[in-house]
Amino acid sequence: MQDKPENYPTAQPNGELLKSLTEVLLGRRATNHFTDEEVPEEYLNAILKFGGQAPSGYNLQPWRFIVVRDAENRKRLQKVAYNQPKIAEAPVIIIALGMKEEWKERASEVFREGAERGAGSLDTWERYRDGAISALSHAPMPLWVNRHTMIAVTTMMLVAEAYGFDTAPMEGFDAAGVRAEFGIPEEAEVCALLAIGRAAAPDKVYPGRFELDRIVYGERYGEKWESSLKSGV
């Protein structure tokens, strides 16, 4: 398994500092149209590496990603994604998959290496592996892999934005069509598409968000959230 990323870009391609977390979270918009400006290889690699560092249940990392950059392949993908123009426009589209069975084949590697790194015991890792597999045998697997894969997709999206790129996460596609076009096995859940590139002007305006007192409850559903700060902060 990979170690923590090293030698990743520490500035945007134009030399500016990375966007702060506040800038990323408050400034990001889902991009409708992209220019044809390429995403430099070192930045794409960094985005993927950080996505691979996302957390997952038992560290089983059930996600797999297909990076689609070839123009003809993006057009093929566009046809099975309701002909959304952004798919053909963006220089990079990532197809995010959640593997419902394949993670079992890698479970031993995950638990053994975790123990070797000190996250567990070399004497008991097999027992913990078996316990994880047993627990997950009762989980609704399509839902489970979707949840964890989307954590990785969100990580990649925010990292791309920090590097100054624009993104568009998409759930509008024919999953069976995507599988057929890209040779994806039936066990894979096609969870999302993520477009990465440069937005074509104009950018979207901030559409507003609900205040906290409309989305947060205290202690139990329906109970008013009490904060010492002004409501909505």
Image: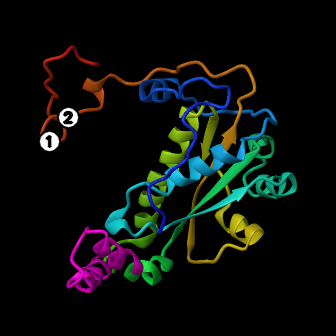
Asked if the stretch drawn in magenta spans residue 128, the answer is: yes
Q: Which mark is residue 114?
A: none
Which residue is painted at 67% across and 55% down in the image? 173
Which residue is painted at 42% across and 25% down in the image? 22
In the structure shown, which secondary structural element does the residue marked by tag 1 occupy? loop
Residues shaded magenta: 109-135
Asked if the residue at tag 1 contacts the one at tag 2, i.e. Cβ–Cβ closer than 8 Å, the answer is: yes
In the structure shown, which secondary structural element does the residue marked by tag 2 occupy? loop
Which residue is painted at 46% across and 24% down in the image? 26
Image spot of residue 200 (x, y percent)? 75, 27
Image spot of residue 120 (x, y percent)? 23, 72
- Residue type, label 1: Arg
With respect to residue 190, does 92 lie above or below?
above
Q: Is residue 78 left or right of residue 51?
A: right
Q: Report crowding for label 1: few under 14, some 14 to 19, many 20 or more residues within 10 A (C-alpha).
A: few
Asked if the stretch drawn in magenta spans residue 10, the answer is: no
For the residue pair 4 and 65, the one nearer the viewer reads as 4
**Quadrant in the picture for residue 179:** bottom right
Image spot of residue 141 (x, y percent)? 42, 72
With respect to residue 86, does 171 lie above or below?
below
Q: Is residue 169 left or right of residue 146?
A: right
| Residue under label 1 | 220
Q: Which mark is residue 217?
A: 2
